Image (tube, rainbow, N blue to C red):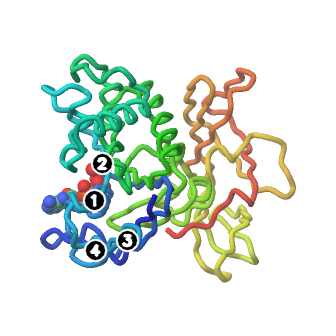
Amino acid sequence: MTNVNVNSVAKTYGTTPVLADITTEFPEGSFTSLLGPSGSGKTTLLRIIAGFIKPDLGVVTIGSRDVTNIPVWGRNIGMMFQSYALFPHMTITQNVAFGLERRGIKGAAARKEVDRALEMVRLPGFGNRMPKQLSGGQQQRVALARAIVIKPSVLLLDEPLSALDRRLRQEMQVELLRIQRESGLTTIFVTHDQEEALTLSDKVAILDKGRIVQIGAPETVYEKPLTRFAAEFLGDSNFLVGTVENGAVRLSDGTTVRSASPLPANGMKVTLAVRPEKMSISARNAEGNSLTALITTVIYAGPVLSYLLETKDGLPLKLFVQNRDGTVLKEGDSVTLNWSPEHTVCVVD
Ligand SMILES: Nc1ncnc2c1ncn2[C@@H]1O[C@H](COP(=O)(O)OP(=O)(O)OP(=O)(O)O)[C@@H](O)[C@H]1O
């Protein structure tokens, strides 16, 4: 078990900066997801930690060891990518043993480690099969066994589950988490699937244009986004823009909205973010915030109903409600939305 540190790491391709001054710690035994849109630099950061790419600036340490100038094979890293490509002409045992052989571990010692790894991914007894005799999910497990059999210090995963269908993917998420917890491996996981990042991780790092804009526990990043980008990228959000007036925010239609976040000085323009499930259609609470809006679209998704709304000033809003009693409101209905200042977060625009 080892912690990974990235210090002032920067990378530019030609004139395009891809990573700008990244400093962050991946604590020993933690599971961190790197989450961000396409091109935000997730893979580049992972490949720098793996040693496939050398940063222009900065230092990478694994444990107490500076590995910035150490090649991939000298870093003792377990890796798994989207294209997990097992060797088709080799048995499962041979596939898993591949990394061990390159480390000089052969024969009975190797077989013992392979059996242990196959047991860990719940494929005991599959060693003599060929990859084509396994389902996609089973092949993925073999790839995971191959990554962990070498007893790496760190496990690096780049969208390993994105080729799987939804059901298999959820199954593998549970397996991955179990294996990570059992092995205690410091794990860094690249994904652009927010739900996956929230469910699996101890920490989520949100990347935007080569910077980590926020890193923290899933519930912190979700409940208290720091920027509009983070609030929008991780989950859905309503944004209310207004001016600070006597400790509250006055919107353009004159409504006053209170926030539990610290607000800047009077007269400053601010953006407030409110999650759509934090709003409700209920009797007005004197302590709370409220806005009246017209329903423009109803999206029926079984357990959850989504409503798109618009205030008379043209402000678009979203509302998610649990479908408790089967009541579905209609387009054109006018409703009053209520929500708490606790769920009204001041974000950097
Ligand atoms: N070898 C390269 N040469 C030039 N530009 C590159 C190279 N590799 C990556 N880039 C650019 O760097 C940026 C970041 O790429 P990276 O693959 O790290 O993003 P990502 O967040 O992992 O995206 P995705 O989710 O699409 O995989 C992109 O704009 C990409 O085009």
Amino acid at the residue labelled 2: Met
Residue 39 appears in the picture as rendered: no
| Amino acid type shown at disc 3 | Val
Q: Are marks 1 and 2 in contact (CB under 8 Å)?
A: yes
Q: Which residue is mark 3?
A: 6
Could you say where residue 46 lies in the image, as x and y percent from the top left? 31, 58
Q: Nearer the viewer, mark 3 or mark 2?
A: 2
Other-residue count near label 3 (Cα within 10 Å), few / some / many at <14 / 14–19 / ≥20: many
Relative depth, front residue between 331 and 278: 278
Residue 57: x %, y % from top left: 25, 78
CA distance separating discs 4 and 1: 15 Å
User: Disc 2 marks which residue?
Assistant: 79
Q: Which residue reaches farthest right?
A: 286
Secondary structure beneath label 4: strand
Taking depth in this image into account, of 18 and 151 the one nearest to the observer is: 151
Which residue is denoted by mark 4 in the rendering? 10
Residue 102 is left or right of residue 67, and the answer is left
Separation of residues labelled 1 and 2 (CA atoms): 8 Å
- Residue located 69% across and 69% down the image: 261
Give whichever of discs 4 and 1 has the lower sequence position.
4
Residue 161 vs 325, above or below: the answer is below
Ligand 1, by image quadrant, is: bottom left
Residue found at x 20% / y 71%: 12
Q: Type of residue at label 4?
A: Ala
- Mark 1, residue position: 50
- Of the two numbered discs 1 and 3 on the same chain, state the one appearing first in sequence: 3
Question: Which of labels 2 and 4 is toward the front?
Answer: 2
